[in-house]
Image: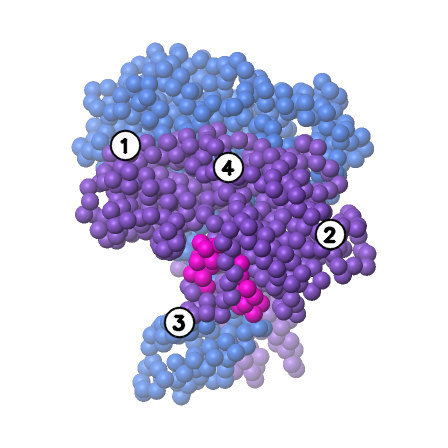
Chain colours: A blue, B purple
Amino acid sequence: MIQNTKLPTSNLRIIPLGGQEEVGKNMTVFEYKNDIIIVDMGIQFPEEDMPGVDYVIPNISYLRGKEKNVKGVVFTHGHMDHIGAAHILLNKLGYPPVIGRDLTLALLKSRLEDHQKGSTSQLKTIQVKSGKEQIKLGEFNLNFFEVEHSIMDSIGVVLTTPVATAIHMGDWTLGSEDSNEKQISYSHLANLPKPTILLMESLGSLKKKDLITEKEMWANFESIINKAPGRVIIGTFSTQVKRIRDIFEYARTINKKIAIDGYSMKVALKIAMQLGYIKAGKGTLIDIKQANNYRDNQLIILCTGAQGESRAVLTRIVTGEHPRITLKKSDTIIFSSSIIPGNEKAIQRLKDSLYRKCDNVIHNEIMNVHVSGHNNIEAIKELIKQIKPDYLLPVYANHYFLKEAKNVAKSIGFNEKNIFILDNGHIINFNKNNAPFIEAKKVDTSYVMVDGLGVGDVGQIVLRDRNTLSQDGMFVIVAIVDRRTGKVKGSPDIISRGFVYLKESKELLYETRKKTVEIINKSSNANGAVNWSYVKDGIRNRIGDFLYAKTERRPMILPVIIEV
Amino acid sequence: MIQNTKLPTSNLRIIPLGGQEEVGKNMTVFEYKNDIIIVDMGIQFPEEDMPGVDYVIPNISYLRGKEKNVKGVVFTHGHMDHIGAAHILLNKLGYPPVIGRDLTLALLKSRLEDHQKGSTSQLKTIQVKSGKEQIKLGEFNLNFFEVEHSIMDSIGVVLTTPVATAIHMGDWTLGSEDSNEKQISYSHLANLPKPTILLMESLGSLKKKDLITEKEMWANFESIINKAPGRVIIGTFSTQVKRIRDIFEYARTINKKIAIDGYSMKVALKIAMQLGYIKAGKGTLIDIKQANNYRDNQLIILCTGAQGESRAVLTRIVTGEHPRITLKKSDTIIFSSSIIPGNEKAIQRLKDSLYRKCDNVIHNEIMNVHVSGHNNIEAIKELIKQIKPDYLLPVYANHYFLKEAKNVAKSIGFNEKNIFILDNGHIINFNKNNAPFIEAKKVDTSYVMVDGLGVGDVGQIVLRDRNTLSQDGMFVIVAIVDRRTGKVKGSPDIISRGFVYLKESKELLYETRKKTVEIINKSSNANGAVNWSYVKDGIRNRIGDFLYAKTERRPMILPVIIEV
């Protein structure tokens, strides 16, 4: 499958670039001759071994020197894992045109302005108005199609070149007649110029059908809100814009008021209202400051924080740090979101705290109050049957989901040889005259971490140090050496943090000082120049071993020797 | 419910002591007059905000000064969350008698010897031989009963005093006719002297019935092992001793060989074999060193590491660090364990790596290959109906599980007023003449963390420092000041780790040095003694603000000023 042939310059090359373990999740590059189209520029959350890192963005080193070739960036929808890195990457690429539907572009602009006021003034935008839109950008013809997902204005994109046609689904479901949303058919994509390549988000490749339909889920939801004895507090993602819309619509019919809290939630709501996607008249939307002027059973509070994020609104409400909302026994709390892997413990703690203060805490283990916006095994089969692609690229999920998507496709007779499981950085070539192949050389996709103002300056060394420091802390030994005698003056200073509680470890410190003085004085016994770097290694090793023997901990040891 | 009355000295007092958020999970204390019985001494895994900590043990400060009152420690079964802290706590309590069944005591002794050779010589053991055993320890009469769990020799205990009878379930299921294990009835516990108090492990209070029975699960398991085209590698907990036994028995019937790897797995197997619980003749058990002498489809490798633990065998196999086992495409990998909350990401990564190298990776999302050893909603109802306790104490799980267990009990008519949800450290009093009450004053249950050789010496300050260091690293500034002039000599030294990559931050360091010199020299302008602590605060604040302005990071700043 992996060949090292001379590259025909006229292949369609597809390169998944972003997304840590999730292939292509945040960014995919399409290249044909001298033209490049990018789909999405999103962020990923840091792994547990990346302490202090805010988020990870796609590595665009492949595009260095090719900035001018980038003819446009398509944003499939407005979620952070699809638009969140745009404020950094668009700037690096000299602001190529951005393409998307209304809500997506509005959220994108808001992200840019949040980071740098006025930066959207440089933005060239192309609005996708309908599914029939056609855009020619260099050698690419772009068409779009509507997809069903948990935020409005989600689209897929068809990239047509003279040699091959790529179909990129974005995040998708089929929708269903049982849902609040319409069912979507993608059959028209079966008629595109051959060969067609389907890039298919595969998060649902291990998921059997939901036990309940979205309609049943919604019926649960409505009944809880309607019958709640007191206030209803709903924690969800700010980006579940359709869920937010539905809650507003239902609240209006039963004459309840909604107060919103959480910065990202407010931004999303404001934008969705401006575009007319959410109708929240004054009769329904109230200011959180006015919340306490209403009867409890008249009030819904919609906020961020269902993942147990330490600074989000729901957490602040439960810890009593919220300036206006104090929990009451009679409040009903609804967790209306799925659990993002890695947040399980934080969510458990949040639940514990909520259960201590409220009698009615509703989450999916109690009653189905959330159905995900992603696909499942049956939907994957149906999609492949409708689109009948020549080649299948499962993307947008961990490797093992992609392998399982391959199994799903095989199970309905799709030819295994035409399925390619890529890694980030693989370059796959398509051309109607030849079989596809993956180039032997991968593109650099090492993590680009954002920490504070730094983009990419936190590398493996800094991370390794942070992890070491977090395990057993650190131990700085400062010794002053008399230049003339080569002997330590006075007693070395020790500064230690995160290792042991110093006040209770006087003997350990005394011994360490004594050993340090011995090591230095012994090294400088010989006349002539002292190799201080050698002496420092000695301190690091011997004091390290000594502390380990006494404590079975290995703090980072940093010797400082100053000659005066 | 919480009263502050004068305590009758003759109440049965029950105090859940161990288990972070899980109430009483690792240790429960029963006290009547001057006698104390302890049930279990287990460990908990550290939370994410406890970097470097090995595990957490119960806080026994309540027992200080009462060591002589402790008449015995009952161990319900041999899992680490029930015996893992015994090597520390038994020693602190002067080795009171330990009570349990064979496998439990053998695993307990092994734990003790692992930590200190010869320490079991001081151990007074009382073997529980059957369900009919009666032991009198001080004022307590102890009876035992068999419970069904994933390890042999699991027991529950009845603690009878003149004023009340406590029934402690340990970890339990009802068993079932569909399982490999026998169904257990607890009805005889309904006839104990009144009032009876049921301490009920409630991990299953949110769990609907398993979708498949244990028999069906096992049929899946057998068919996978039988049909495997190559080797079968099974990752599980070393403490799932029954599962290990069943795998051995099945292997024998189909004439496959089993190689074991992982220290804890080997220990558990050896002990279970010595006791005759696992029959692994030479025909079946082979040395892992001989594994490559057998045909692939003849071989099963049973190992630790299904939770993605970085140093466990399965992880070493997949990363290529295992000295003997190299993965092949044809290997079949089975994850035969549930996911411990907090391990989700590590398991995802492990799955990714396995899917890259093997064609057959089996886990519960693919096919049911694990059924947990805990109860569920229906079992909880049945248990309460069988035992008919006067009072119910849901324990052994996070608060929200306990609240839900209360809801389950209420749903079958159990009187809400007789259900008590405790926190660790609560003291609840029972006496046949009065209503139960919880004392106003809680016992100290602050975390006792074990890190290397240190028990309890890592406290909040050390942890806070470790977390701070892990976020943005640290920054030590060493300045030498001339005692006569009060001015800085030369240029301050800077040692920084985990903050920025120093080689690429020369200007930042230059500016920092300059500012430090300014701050010190300015402070020492005035004649007379310099308040160095004040100067250091100045450096911390001003350099901190400077670095934040430049980087939006807040490393820990440690100024060292040395006068020479």
Which amino acid, by three-letter code, is at mark 1?
Lys
Which amino acid, by three-letter code, is at mark 4?
Gln
Pair 4/1: label in front: 4
Which image quarter: residue A411? top left
Which circle marks residue B227 in the picture?
1
Which amino acid, by three-letter code, is at mark 2?
Phe
Which secondary structure class fits the magenta region best? helix
Which amino acid, by three-letter code, is at mark 3?
Asp
Which residue is the site of mark 3? Answer: A545
Which circle marks residue B183 in the picture?
4
Which image quarter: residue A564? bottom left
Q: Earlier in the sequence, mark 4 or mark 1?
A: 4
Is the same chain shared between marks 1 and 3? no
Decide: is B290 above or below A348. below
Pair 2/3: label in front: 2
Residue B482: percent from the left, percent from the top? 53, 81
| SS type, badge 2 | strand
Which image quarter: residue B345? top left
Is the same chain shared between marks 4 and 3? no
Residue span colored magenta: B88-112
